[in-house]
Amino acid sequence: MTDLLAPPPAVDAGRRVVAARTALFSRRIDVRAAVVTLTALLLAMAVGVLALSLGDVAFSPGEVLATLVGLGDSRAELVILEWRLPRVLGALVFGLALGVGGAIFQSLTRNPLNSPDVIGFDAGAYTGALLVITTVGVSVTTTAAAALAGGAATALLVYLLAFRRGFTGFRLIIVGIGVASMLASLNTWIILNADLNIALVASAWGVGSLNLITAEQVLVATCVIVPIAIAVALLVDRMHLMEMGDDTASALGVRIGGTRLALVILGVGLTAVVTAMAGPIAFISLAAPQIARRLTGSASVTLTASGAVGALLLVSSDVLAQRLFAPTQIPVGIVTVCLGGVYLVWLLIQEARRR
């Protein structure tokens, strides 16, 4: 299965790059990766404009753009800016965070099957949220805090169990799958023993949904995600060196243990924030880095392209969730799971053709 999901062969050293130099930094930019990232971002914004225009009260794309720059009428401002825009911005920001978080874990373990939802962090966040929902009650603040705590505690447990005389990505995945399975059983038991109304609310939250996202939640999430993204950017060179193996990275001056732990914490932070605000949204963290890797033709994970593809996937999935059975809206997590199944079937077909 690892071969099935493996990236395309590394391209030759003749890839076109440009040098970007300022007084603060100097970096070589891969032209193809930059084009893929920019294209994915533009497509994501275009889908966002489409999402703002669709609904019971429809607007043309021109009316949407006019309203976004302050030239719309009062009705358009109410519907577009206050009702629809927070959800679209949430999809873009959360998708970007999930894409980058998944890329971090796939880079650390050098395994394309790895993502936070696969190795149990989402299940841990769900457990934390369930404990609060079924005991204290439904509250955005307490549920988000409990989800963050549950995801962080699960990540620490998986990391400690996987760290035995060294760290291996395969061991992390196996331990994570085991912990996720136990937590899934615990979550099912909690829901079965809860009051019916509370169980329905908890089950809906556990699917992953953007239906009730507010501007305040998006602002809080953005204020957390931006510093984490900056910290990831500072470690990205060391992360790519570690993809060549611990011995090579260590010989090049990378502190393996500290860098890996820092990246794990940052990756968990990105996914836990999204889970706390919108519930566990599956598939994005797993698929976005691999799709970006194929589009860029890169031999290693590209964080910016992964984030851009993640934003495009989630905002597109949310449009489908809103309009597929309109006027009924389904949780976006259902759409992402279905897309994930289609994606894996496509990979199986590709593998069968190669053989």
Image (tube, grey):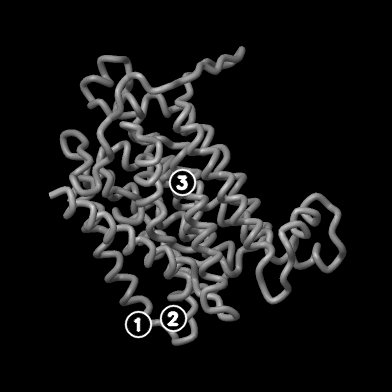
Of pointers 2 and 3, the one earlier in the residue sequence: 2
The one nearer the camera, 200 or 43, is 43
Q: How far across and how far down the image is residue 82, in percent? A: 74, 63
Q: Amino acid at mark 1?
A: Leu
Evaluate if marks 2 and 3 touch, with contact meaning CB atoms under 8 Å apart. no
**Residue on which the image places disc 3:** 269
Q: Residue furthest bottom?
A: 196
Q: Residue furthest top?
A: 23
Secondary structure state at the residue bearing disc 3: helix
Q: Residues within 10 Å of mark 1 (few under 14, many from 20)?
A: few
Of pointers 2 and 1, the one earlier in the residue sequence: 1
Of pointers 1 and 3, the one earlier in the residue sequence: 1
Q: Amino acid at mark 3?
A: Gly
Number of the label disc, if any, that sits on residue 199: 2
Residue 26 visible somewhere in the drawing: yes
Which quadrant of the view contains residue 73? Answer: bottom right
Q: How many marks?
A: 3
Please give the name of the residue rendered at 48% of the width and 38% of the height, measured from the top-left corner: 36
Please give the name of the residue rendered at 60% of the width and 15% of the height, measured from the top-left corner: 22
Q: Amino acid at mark 2?
A: Ala
The one nearer the camera, 330 or 346, is 346
**Residue on which the image places disc 1:** 192
Residue 47 in the figure: left or right of residue 117: right
